[in-house]
Every structure is written in C-alpha cells, then in structure tokens.
Image (cartoon, coloured by chain):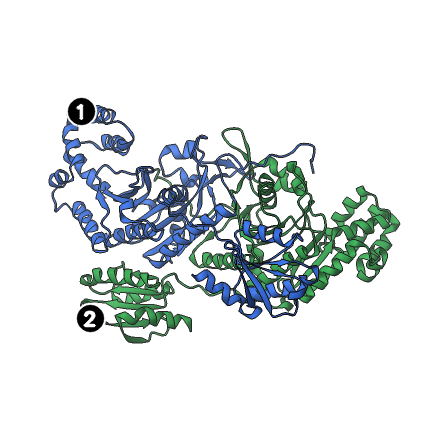
Chain colours: A green, B blue
Amino acid sequence: MAKNKSLGTDPYKGVRDFYPEEQFIQNYIFQTWQKVARSFGYEEYNASPLEPSELYEAKSGEEIVNEQTYIFEDRGGRSVALRPEMTPTVARMVAAKERELPFPLRWFSIPNVFRYEKPQRGRLREHYQLNVDLFGADSVEADTEIITVAYQILKEFGAKDSDFVIKINNRKIIRALFEKLSISPKESEKLSKVIDKKEKISAEIFEESVEKLIGDRKKELLQNLESNQKLIKTLGEKDPEVSKLIDLIEALDTLGIKNVQFTSTLMRGFDYYTGIVFEIFDNSEENNRSLFGGGRYDDLLEIFGKRKIPTIGFGMGDVTLRDFLETHNLLPKFRASAKLHLCVEDESAREYARILAESLRETGINTSVDLSRKKKGEQFKIADKKKIPFAICLGKKEIGSRSLIIRNLKTREDKEILESKVAQFIFDSLKE
Amino acid sequence: MAKNKSLGTDPYKGVRDFYPEEQFIQNYIFQTWQKVARSFGYEEYNASPLEPSELYEAKSGEEIVNEQTYIFEDRGGRSVALRPEMTPTVARMVAAKERELPFPLRWFSIPNVFRYEKPQRGRLREHYQLNVDLFGADSVEADTEIITVAYQILKEFGAKDSDFVIKINNRKIIRALFEKLSISPKESEKLSKVIDKKEKISAEIFEESVEKLIGDRKKELLQNLESNQKLIKTLGEKDPEVSKLIDLIEALDTLGIKNVQFTSTLMRGFDYYTGIVFEIFDNSEENNRSLFGGGRYDDLLEIFGKRKIPTIGFGMGDVTLRDFLETHNLLPKFRASAKLHLCVEDESAREYARILAESLRETGINTSVDLSRKKKGEQFKIADKKKIPFAICLGKKEIGSRSLIIRNLKTREDKEILESKVAQFIFDSLKE
C-alpha cells in the first residue's frame, strides 16, 4: 500500500454518492416506479451499462454519439460505450428474441445512464431513469395506457392534477401540416429542430429562424402552430392522425385524466419518434420546466434487420423527479432500517442481547445491538441520531426478568413491557 | 439512421441481459439480501460505478489494478475506473464524513462491479455483489454479528446448515506462527500467498514451494497448519488472538451457528485484511467451492489520511450465489407482475375494461388489459404464456352486468363471480 500521499475522498466529477439518507429517497422513488409499473402488468428487465458502441451510431441525434457518450476501447480492441439512454438496449433485447416473446410486451427498467456533460451546476454525468415501454401494439388504447402509467406514477408520489400538465402532440400531424404548406422533407427536418427549441429561445429569434428556412410560408405556419382550432381545420377533423389524437385525449378524459394539452409545437429531441409524443411539465412557478416525456417509435427494430414492432414508451429521470417532489413538498422522511436498538449496559447481558435480538428479528422487528460499549445515555444518543424509533437497555437485572423498559427515543417516554409483548408493541406504535 | 447494415443483437462480451424471468430472480436475490441486512439494522448506501482510478492504485493486489480493472481517460484527461469492487468506494465515503457519521456504522450496498476477465466460460465481466460492512467496532461481538448476517442470508434463501460450512481464520494467528518459526516479514508475504493457493495446487507443488521459501522450517509449519490443536498449543491458548478466535466460535455456537470450521490455511486474497477472515463453502459435491467471504480490515481509512476505523465486512456475488441456489434447488418460480388479465372480446367493452382495470389496481390487484385485438382463445393463451394466473373476458353482455366469469389460466377452471368480489377472490387464491 502506498501510504505516502493521502487520497482524496471526492467521487468522480458529476456523479453522486448516496449516503443512507439519500439512498432512502432513491429506494422510495424506485419502489414507487416499480409499484405503479407492475400494477399495469409491466415486467422488469435490465442489462449492463456497457454496450457495444455501434449500438449508438445507428440512431439518436449525432450530437449524443459524438460528444456526450462515454466511449472507450477495451483491451481486446472493442469499442465500448456506457449507455447514454436505455431505448437502444431494450430495442436490441426485443429484437434478439423477437420470435419467442409474447407480444404485446409490457416492460420496464430502472437503469443508470451516462452522459459526458460539461461540468456545470445541476448537470450530472450519471442518473437513473425509469423506462416504460409497450411493444407490439399500435393503437389509441396503447397510447392511452402509456400516458396513464406516467400520470399514475405522479399521482402515486402524491402530486395533484394541478401540479403538472401533460402536453401531447403527434409528429405525423406536423408532418401533414408541412406537406400542406409545401415544405420539402429537407426543410422539414431543420424546421422541426427549430420548433423543438421554440420554448427555449425568444419569439424574435424563433420567427427569424423560421423565415430563413421557409420564407413567406412562415405566416401560415405560425398561425397553425398558435391555434389548435386553425390547425385541425387546416388538416380536417377526419384526417386519421388528427382523429387519433382526439380519441386519445377523450380516452384519457374517461379515466379522469384532464390535465392534458394538445401542443402542436412539442417535438421531443430524438430522431426515432414516429407518431404521438408527450411531455409532462411542472406547473409550479419555482420549477416551471419539463419533467419527462416519451413517444411512439415504430421503426426502431428495423436497424437490427427485424420486422417493424410498433412501440410507445417514456423515460423518467430521478434527478428532475426529485426536484419536482422537493418543490411540491412530497419527499418522504428518512426511516431507519432498525426499529429497535438494544443497548447493552453490562457485558454480562451481551449474550442475552444477542439472543433477544435474533428472536425479535424472527418476528419481523429489525433490531440492532449496541457494540459501542459506551454509557447508556450515549447509546441512546447514537440510536436517536441514527433515527431508530425505540430502544431497550439490557443490564444485569434484565437477564432472566421478563419485564423490560422500552423507550420512545423521539418523545423520551419510557414504558414497562413484557418481553413477549415487545414485537407487538412496536408493530402497533409504528402503524399509527 | 444508417439502415444499410443490420446491427447485431448481442450484448457486450461477458455481460448479461436480464429478460423478465432472469430479472425476477435478480430481484428475489436483492430483496432477500436487503431484508436480512435491514433486520440487523444495516442501512443501504450506493455510489456510481465510475471512480477516479487512483482509488485503486493505493490498494488491492497489483494484478487487479493493472490487468483486470477497466480504466479509461475521459475527455477532460481524467483517469476513470469502473469499480472492480466496492470496498475502496465505501472506505472513501466513510472517510469523507468520518467526523459526522454515528459510529458504529452498519452499512450495506448492492453494487455492480466490473473486471476485465479474459473471455472464458463462466467468467463474467460484470456482476452484482452484496457488500455488508460494520465500521467502528473492533470486538468479538462485531465479528460475531457480521458472520451471523452472512449465515442468516443463506438461511433466508432456504439453505440448510449441512449445505455449507463457514471457514474462519485470523491472519494475526498465522503471523504469530510465522514469528515463532523465525520466518522473516519478507518470507511471510510470499508464504501467505503460497498458503492462500494451497487448495488450488497439488500437495507436492505446495510442499515444494514452501520448502523453497523457508527450507527446513517447512516440517514444523506444515504440522501446525494441519492440526489446529498443535497450532493452538504452539501459540498458547492465552495468546490474545487465539482466544478471540475461540470466543468468536463459541459466540456463534450460542446463536445455533455450528457449521463453523477454524481453517488456519484460509488467507483470502486482498492485502488489506488485518485480522479475522472467513469464507463460506458449498458442501455439495456438484458445486464444492467457495461461495463468498470477508474479513476485518482496520487500516483501510488511513490511505485517506484519516484516523483508523476498525471495520469488518463481506462481499457476496450474485453469480456464485445463483449457482448455489440452483444446485440446492432453491430458486423461486417466476411470478408475473399482473395477477389478472382482462380480455376484450368486443370493442364496445374497451372503455369498461379500462375503468374496471383502474379500479382493481386501486385495490392492489395488478391488472393488464388486452391490446392484441385477437380472439378470446388467443388472448387467454398469451396471458398464460406470460404466466398471469387469472383472466376475465369482457364482451357486450358483461357491460352493465355485475356478474363476471373468472378463469384460472393454469387449471382452466371457470367460476362465476360478482364484479365487487373479484379482488378478494384473487387475494385469497394467491394466498393459498
């Protein structure tokens, strides 16, 4: 061991250490995600964060592959990437077993994903992201279900309908509008990117950029983008994509999901979306921003030489979600693993403590035993600092006695109790 | 999108894809680990798999840093490693908050760790590993607790005492023996490595290697290593390290843990162990091998320029554990997320299906709804293939009726039931 120079204790730049109080919140988020996804019958899958880098060369915006993805060469000369997102991985997995899997597939995963971001405030190089995907169903019902899952997750976290809004669009509608306005495919591509940035740039720059691309067709485009009524009129209510969107919004309405907004300028970054796209926004003033989103990508499996499998899904990151929960005061309070701490006041009681702890664990009471050999008051203090709710002190006189004193470490109340009643007492107290 | 060439669907070499049936077992393993660790009051922590590579240069065997660790340079010129094990990370985290953390600390984590292994059967480049550590307690009680946690985990998985054996040693005992036999520190180091490999090489090669290192002191060394009685006699029962080991074995015995073996040749690879080391072996003939182990490392935090914090811990990998569970027939059967599948026989029933599903989910019944639009028989088949236990078919005549037919997809039994009783029926059936 090289002991001459002390090592630093910082983690790698842009990633997080999860101390127990942080990990508690991570677990709460992950479990809530799992609970809701499973309630709709979604099954969990996972994969390694290491992927052959060629998986990302075939898709995503160019920017991501070249500048933001961690890529390195292994000793065998293979180019390896740390996954920047989960969609290519899940598409790869579905493509590999496309003949045997029972479609429609409901799948979810909670991977960590990596982006090489330039170091700046709030930009992390690793975060966790719930991915929920529905493979092999191309219908308004499928779209309705995926958006319902997203909605129910926020509700399960305790959010109110007024806390967020679900913006929905259909890329095919925008494409149809472009066609109506005689915008060429090449112009369309650039124009989509400009529209995607509309909310991030000033109205003047936006209008200038549009004019530069399509000249005097600008006016009509902007009128259609500003008024949904005008847009629907331009395309006709019987346009199949328009009517699908109307059906979707109605189906959500029958389920009580009414905080929905048709937003024709919503594009979402990735190239692979082919139809419906949606994005959930925080309504609060302090955190008025996009939380997460998703969309339909029907063509992705073709890059593996497989048949088309229509798919819709979304991804939801832990960092933005946590900000949302914090803003709306929805984060849970830390609860310690141990519900009871057994203090040891006299070494003669150590064996009794060990055996009592084992029998309490068997009844389902998580129990820790003192190892500090400090004074009783100190032991209580440490247990309280760890946020353990109850403590019992064991000394000479407790050995063989069937009566114990249990302390509520928060209220400092003591209560005499039979040894055989300890587990029930703790269960009842924590239920309240 | 580059569509000219099809992409392969294989994962990166040496890592695993977890399809739902595989992930189900991973979740079972992780939850069992969490449950037992928490029952002793251990708190979960986590960190990124990315670490500054200098963290591994200060410790571990040289081999690991140079040949087996994934190291690459990021775009900022920083040398980054994919963690090959968790101990340096947790030591870093404890060192960083050493002044504020409430010792003794009971911590656990379930990280994925990476090793660049030469491609060969059964050698994976990524696996998950439970890490359980107890920081800030240097006593027989602390050693007893850590070994008890390891034991209880195997019991929780359903293993019998006769399925495995816990081998225990104390490195200080071997060091004391070396001193008695006038073996120099330099000889000791090499000798420890030879002893560590004893079980992997032939007796002849082992004896030759020992003789080459220490000449005619070989005979006495081997006699002591072969007989624990002789060894204890050589050092004296009152030797503090010998008596600690005896106390530990006795303390485990009072907790009913009797499949314990003092094994003086047990060394364990890592350089940082300073006292007690232990390793759990599978007793079965088919899988007669080391499963996992741990030990006491009291000096590790010194590399961060901090005070000594005595620590004992262990690591338990998912791959070896799974082999063990498979060998002893202890793997659980896959259970689907959804407990009930609602088939839709007629499109007019779709809205009813959506609303019934939502209300069942609210009562805690995970419910999926058909999106395939296939015939009833096909819908049952798909649900059964997904291992969903129950299905209800909804057509025109079910709308508004309060009576439904629920099918047990395994037994193919049908049963008429009131809509309001569906949830209770499923709860009761799955409890049996």
Q: Residue at x 51, y 39 (%)?
A: B78
The residue lying toward the viewer, choosing from A168 and B122, is B122
- Residue lying at the far right in this picture: please name it: A216
Q: Which amino acid does label 1 sit on?
A: Gly
On the image, the x and y values in percent for residue A253 come to 69, 66
- Displayed quadrant of residue A79: top right
The residue lying toward the viewer, choosing from A146 and A388, is A146
Relative placement, left or right, of B96 versus A248 is left
Could you classify mark 2 by the number of other residues whose Cα lies within 10 Å: few (under 14), some (14-19), or many (20 or more)? few
Residue A334 position (above or below residue B296): below
Relative placement, left or right, of B411 versus A376 is right
* Residue A159 appears in the rendering: no
**Circle 2 sits on which residue?**
A401
Which chain does the numbered disc 1 sit on?
Answer: B
- Displayed quadrant of residue A328: bottom right
**Circle 1 sits on which residue?**
B215
Residue at mark 2 to residue at mark 1: CA–CA distance: 60 Å
Q: Which residue is drawn at 28% across and 68% down?
A: A392
User: In the rendered view of the protein, which quadrant contains the N terminus of chain B?
Assistant: top right
The residue lying toward the viewer, choosing from A297 and A94, is A94
On the image, the x and y values in percent for residue A117 come to 59, 46
Regarding mark 1 in the picture, which secondary structure is present there? helix
Residue A291 position (above or below residue B81): below
